[in-house]
Amino acid sequence: MKKIIYFLLALLMVLPATAQDADVVTPPENLQLEEYALQSQLYQWEEFTPVTMPLMIGFDNNDVYLQGLCDYLPTSWVKGTRNGNTITLPTGQFLGLAAGNDDNYYPMFFCGVNPDEQTTEDVTLSDIVLTIDEQGNMSTNSWFMVSSSAEVTEGTDSYMTLTSNSILKLEDKAATPANPTIVEFMPYTASNGYAGLSMDIPTTDVNGEPLMTSKLYYKIYTDIEKDIQPMLFPADEHNYIDEDMTEIPYRFTDDYDIVYGGYAAYWYHDTKDFNRIGVQTIYRGGNEEHTSEIVWLDIKPYAGEGTIFDFNALDKETTPVSNKSHDGDITEDLVLQKDYVTLTVTPSGANTPNRYWVDYNLDAIQLRLYGGSMTFEVPEGCTIEKMYFNHGDWNDYNEFDCGDFDGTVWTGSTNRCELSICGDGGNTKLNSITVVVKGTTGICTEHILPMTTLRSYNLQGREVSASAKGFVIQQQRTANGQLKTIKTIRK
């Protein structure tokens, strides 16, 4: 089963649905729909956040159908009845079952909260009455709530609570769409057989005004060694796509590989060559086309851009590993030096030592960390600008003492940065680290201290030649007279 990355139900303590007697609302065929936008305040974690949600509304005599009132089920419907300039939406309407991250399904109901008895703690449910003005806009004092039950009982959970609700009728006019956001990138793995991207595609323009989603599109771009191309979704690789696509309508879904609203898009080819992945939105309102910026997510540096500490590339035959003995344990500072970068790994200080370990799935060595720290240093006159961490696992409580980290890429400007490794909640498994340094010519090289190698030793303490392969401990003296011990891996 595909990993669902666009629903956030893992945060909600509810029981999976076992049966539902209620029926979902189904509008009549060929219902004529018009585009609206719901502007609200989302109440979540004791805070109110302004939100704009696209709605489709259709009128069939006195029956009114509204689509888009639930983020988790954006194509579900709610039915109301029109009487003059008011529309009444009965509370407790069943929206359907939403898939959670745990492969369970959760019932969702659309409810109204009594405007005279609404608090953030206790609520009384009641029907919602919308008042229509001369421009076709609608307003109400009621709160909207998507909950796990049609009634408020002990154990009922609210998935969404929306206050200050107004529904605006949209006009077809030119606008520049707001920039999208990349929520999560899932690289291709052979075990999954697919890659994916989760996005947040705003339905507002750069001024915060709502857009007609029927005129909103998005593109995914790849950057491979500075060759930027829109990603193609070929029909012959996707079972439920009828024609090749590079531009995806906001409202399009095939209910498998491309999810409504840009919540997720999946594809079936490798991503190991991607340097960056990007998203751009396109809006064609008022007979004009306007685009957002391409918003990029860095994945790996361009060829030759950085200094690479590639632990996966270490020779399993000559590199000490800890799978069968303690030879790969890091019991004193491990100092690795390459180009202008010095990487120091300290012992873990925990029951499990930091160590080199052969990962059986990768059939390659990883640097596994259970505590301690990693320090990255470059000489005076140089600065570390980016660091790319290719990891199998990462402890979210790891902490840098400078710069910003997005889970994969560190950005900043410093000649020294320390990463503290948290030992609680799982270890950190590193495949490679690429460090991008600015100033490696000119002033930077002038401050490099030349080193003279005095002696080289193997792990058993026996002296070896300066050209020996494998894990070598070098005793070196710098130009300012300091004596340093450097551990290097030679292939």
Image: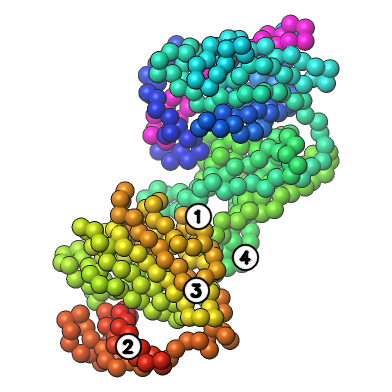
Disc assigned to residue 406: 1
| Residue 92 seen | no
Q: Residue at x 16, y 81 (%)?
A: 460
Of marks 1 and 3, the one in the foreground: 3
Residues shaded magenta: 81-110
> Gap in Å between the C-alphas at discs 1 and 4?
24 Å
Q: Residue at x 56, y 32 (%)?
A: 47
> Gap in Å between the C-alphas at discs 2 and 4?
46 Å
| Residue 319 seen | yes
Q: Which residue is mark 4?
A: 227
| Amino acid type shown at disc 4 | Asp
Disc assigned to residue 415: 3
| Amino acid type shown at disc 3 | Asn
- The secondary structure type at the circle numbered 2 is strand
Mark 2, other Cα within 10 Å: few <14 / some 14–19 / many ≥20: some
User: Which label's residue is closer to the chain start, 2 or 3?
Assistant: 3
185 to the left or right of 180: left
Position of the C terminus by quadrant:
bottom left
